[in-house]
């Protein structure tokens, strides 16, 4: 295939590396590497093991949710395969030096298996959208709780508006997916005739894979449970380093970190995570070295579990070479 798409991505990739790398270097120098290492030497190993197990459980929960979305359209895939594909996606997105994401990898794997890349992409989009909706709900609930509880945690208006705006956008996107065929019939008539048939197919597939009723409630509940697990992992990693911060702080800090990380100027959320952790934990007296040690530990937990995807790819029958196809999507 043509290398043109790769060439077009290079400027953005370089920008992301510069922003993430520059921000990390600045924060680490301010906190002093020797002090960060001293904090790391105090890690509570049993708590670290618990965090690793919870991270693995979170991936299993996401794979099960993905299966429920697929089952609604008669795509009954074994949980073992879904879990393996999810792990491989994590490996590709977090470990391999590639410009693609784990979701693109999963789309290629599933598309080959069910013979429809459109349906594969729709199922992954809905799986991610419901997860993001749950994330925004937790962020906004935490912001409201901070105000009502009288906590002295300071959050800039920009971050509050970001959380609210992304939450509204997530709800709008979910409603838009349900109403996609109607929107296509209403708005699509004003578009060029040649693009109307493919848009209609996309709208129909997207609406078909968007759960309704009790199934939607179950999917959202599983999404909330996953995000709560992700917050708990941060709190446990904090305790492993001797940081005993209020759970409310984690419920606010973690979603905001992930939301800021969506801005395409960061590599795997690096830089954004460290900046937010330093700002919020500093408000309760946690030194920058401890805050950065926590940020690095959380990333290490995520990376360590992602490495299992490489083993699945090597021995589990899920083709890592599909990453090449995903990179050219």
Image: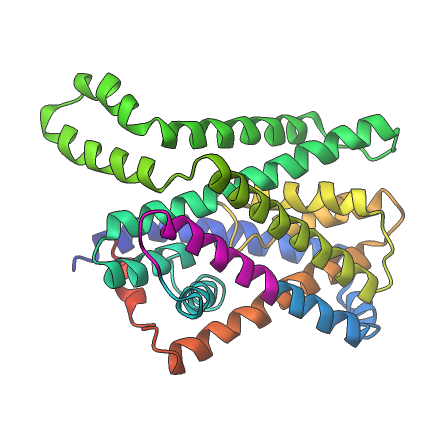
The residue range painted magenta reads 56-76
For residue 60, which quarter of the picture? bottom right
Q: Residue at x 33, y 35 (%)?
A: 207
Tell me residue 37's x, y (percent).
78, 71
Q: Going by the picture, which residue comes out furthest to the front?
A: 214
Q: Nearer the viewer, residue 7 or 199?
A: 199
Q: Quadrant of the N terminus?
A: bottom left
Residue 252 in the image, given as x and y percentages of width and height: 72, 40
Q: Magenta span has 64? A: yes
In this view, 31 is above or below 153: below
Residue at the spot 46% in from the left edge and 66% down from the top edge: 83
Residue 228 falls within the magenta-colored stretch: no
Question: Left or right: where does residue 81 sit relative to residue 260?
Answer: left
Whether residue 62 is visible here, answered yes or no, is yes
Residue that appears at 60% across and 64% down:
57
Q: Is residue 173 left or right of residue 255?
A: left
Residue 131 seen in this snapshot: no
What residue is at 49 percent from the left and 45 percent from the top? 265
State whether residue 243 is above or below residue 95.
above
In this view, the residue in front, 105 or 218, is 218
Q: Main secondary structure of the magenta part?
A: helix
Residue 261 image point, x, y percent: 56, 46
Rendering quarter of residue 203: top left
* 101 left or right, relative to 121: right
Residue 150 placement: quadrant = top right
Residue 100 is situated, as x and y percent measured from the top left of the image, at: 37, 57
């Amino acid at each position: 295939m043509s290398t043109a798409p790769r060439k077009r991505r290079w400027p953005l990739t370089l920008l992301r590396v510069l922003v993430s790398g520059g921000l990390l270097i600045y924060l680490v120098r301010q906190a002093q590497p020797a002090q960060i290492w001293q904090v790391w030497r105090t890690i509570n190993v049993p708590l670290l093991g618990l965090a690793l197990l919870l991270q693995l459980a979170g991936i299993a929960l996401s794979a099960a949710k993905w299966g429920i979305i697929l089952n609604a359209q008669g795509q009954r895939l074994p949980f073992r395969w879904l879990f393996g594909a999810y792990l491989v996606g994590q490996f590709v997105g977090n470990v391999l030096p590639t410009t693609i994401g784990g979701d693109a990898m999963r789309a290629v794997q599933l598309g080959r298996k069910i013979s429809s890349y459109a349906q594969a992409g729709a199922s992954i989009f809905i799986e991610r959208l419901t997860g993001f909706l749950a994330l925004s709900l937790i962020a906004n609930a935490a912001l409201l709780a901070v105000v009502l509880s009288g906590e002295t945690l300071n959050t800039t208006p920009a971050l509050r508006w970001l959380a609210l705006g992304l939450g509204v956008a997530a709800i709008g996107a979910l409603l838009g997916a349900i109403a996609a065929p109607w929107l296509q019939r209403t708005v699509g008539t004003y578009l060029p005739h040649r693009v109307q048939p493919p848009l209609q197919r996309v709208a129909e597939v997207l609406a078909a894979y968007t759960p309704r009723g009790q199934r939607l409630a179950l999917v959202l509940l599983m999404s909330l449970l996953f995000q709560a697990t992700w917050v708990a992992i941060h709190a446990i990693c904090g305790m492993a380093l001797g940081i005993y911060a209020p759970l409310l702080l984690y419920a606010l800090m973690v979603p905001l970190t992930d939301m800021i990380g969506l801005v395409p100027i960061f590599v795997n959320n690096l830089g954004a995570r460290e900046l937010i952790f330093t700002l919020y934990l500093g408000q309760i007296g946690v030194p920058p070295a401890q805050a950065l040690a926590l940020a690095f530990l959380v990333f290490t937990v995520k990376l360590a579990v992602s490495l299992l995807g490489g083993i699945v790819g090597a021995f589990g029958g899920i083709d890592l070479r599909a990453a090449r196809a995903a990179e050219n999507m």
